[in-house]
Image (cartoon, rainbow, N blue to C red):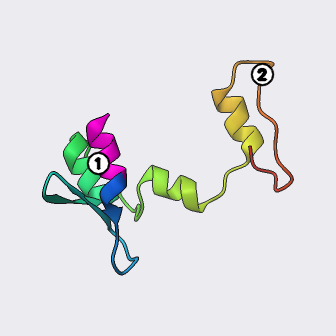
Amino acid sequence: MAVVNEFYANFYCPTDQAPKCARIRGHLIKIDADSLNEFLQTPVLLEEGESLPTYSRFCILRSDPREVEASLCISGKGFILNTEGQP
């Protein structure tokens, strides 16, 4: 918990540009997809012809909430959409 508190207390980006950074125990830590994937040892693998990882494509190409609901939720269960059509 102490590390999490220190992270949020020191989270900043002086020029408000990516990647965001946090100073934790004297070390400047970059908070971007490449750094996090390297830390978690989860390399981004692109299929031939792809320019973006799957999650990035998901974020950009606003998917149909009902399609997501059908894929993730228990049959007969779901979620409520707000006025903007988002869960």
> As shown in the figure, which amino acid type bears the numbered disc 2?
Lys
Q: Is residue 62 left or right of residue 6?
A: right
Most frequent secondary structure within the magenta stretch: helix
Residue under pointer 2: 77
Q: Is residue 2 left or right of residue 28?
A: right
**Mark 1 packing: few (<14 Cα in 10 Å), some, or many (20+)?**
some
Instruction: Give the quadrant of residue 59.
Output: bottom right
| Picture coordinates of residue 83, whole percent (x, y) | 86, 53
| Picture coordinates of residue 5, whole percent (x, y) | 34, 44
Residue under pointer 1: 6
> Which segment is the magenta one?
1-8
* Distance from the alpha carbon under mark 1 to that under mark 2: 39 Å
Q: Is residue 55 left or right of residue 71?
A: left
Please tell me whether mark 2 sits on a helix, a strand or a loop: loop
Q: Is residue 11 above or below residue 64?
A: below
| Picture coordinates of residue 70, whole percent (x, y) | 72, 31
Residue 47 included in the magenta stretch of the image: no
Name the residue furthest top: 75
Name the residue furthest left: 26
Q: Nearer the viewer, residue 26 or 28?
A: 26
Task: Tell me if residue 44 can be seen.
Answer: no
Image point 26% across, 41% down: which residue? 3
